[in-house]
Amino acid sequence: MTPILKAALAVLFLAALPAGAAPLAEVTGVDKGDMLKLRSGPGTGYRVVVGLPNGTMVRNHGCTRVGSTPWCKVSLNDVRQLRGYVSGHYLKRR
């Protein structure tokens, strides 16, 4: 599947979701004893807001590529006012 086709399908899927319902994703692949850094902006130069362990459920509000990393704007599923950016490499769609 071409990247353009993947992007088009993603846009169609997101458009079909109810208003305000961002897709659910799970934090995965973080090394044991470490946490995924939720940052204030899309990149490692932004301050760390909080660490997220494997298994944390987040709402993905969209991703943008910075260099080779997809940075996704997320909110915690249980604490939606807590928002920031994480590397999309560590998110698994639920």
Image: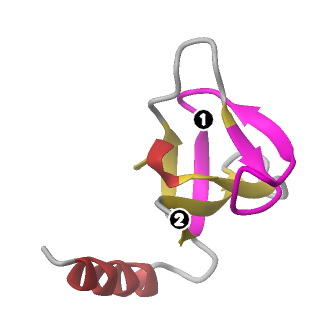
* Residue 94 x, y percent position in the rendering: 40, 49
Mark 1 residue type:
Thr
Disc 2 to disc 1, how far (Cα)?
A: 25 Å
Q: Which mark is residue 67?
A: 2
Residue farthest to the top, as pictured = 33
Toward which corner of the image does residue 21 lie, by quadrant?
bottom right
Q: Give the residue at x 75% y 33%.
A: 51
Judged from the image, the secondary structure of the residue bearing numbered disc 2 is loop
Toward which corner of the image does residue 66 lie, by quadrant?
bottom right
Q: Which colour assignment does the render follow?
A: secondary structure
Instruction: Answer with left or right where residue 40 lies relative to residue 13.
Output: right
Mark 2 residue type:
Gly
Q: Which residue is mark 1?
A: 56
Residue farthest to the front, as pictured = 67
Instruction: Answer with left or right where residue 11 lies relative to residue 2.
Output: right
Vertical arrangement, residue 51 with respect to residue 45, above or below: above
Mark 2 or 1, nearer chain start? 1
Q: Give the residue at x 12% y 73%.
A: 1
Residue 39 forms part of the magenta stretch: yes
Q: Give the residue at x 66% y 27%.
A: 35
Toward which corner of the image does residue 56 lie, by quadrant?
top right
Magenta residues span 37-62
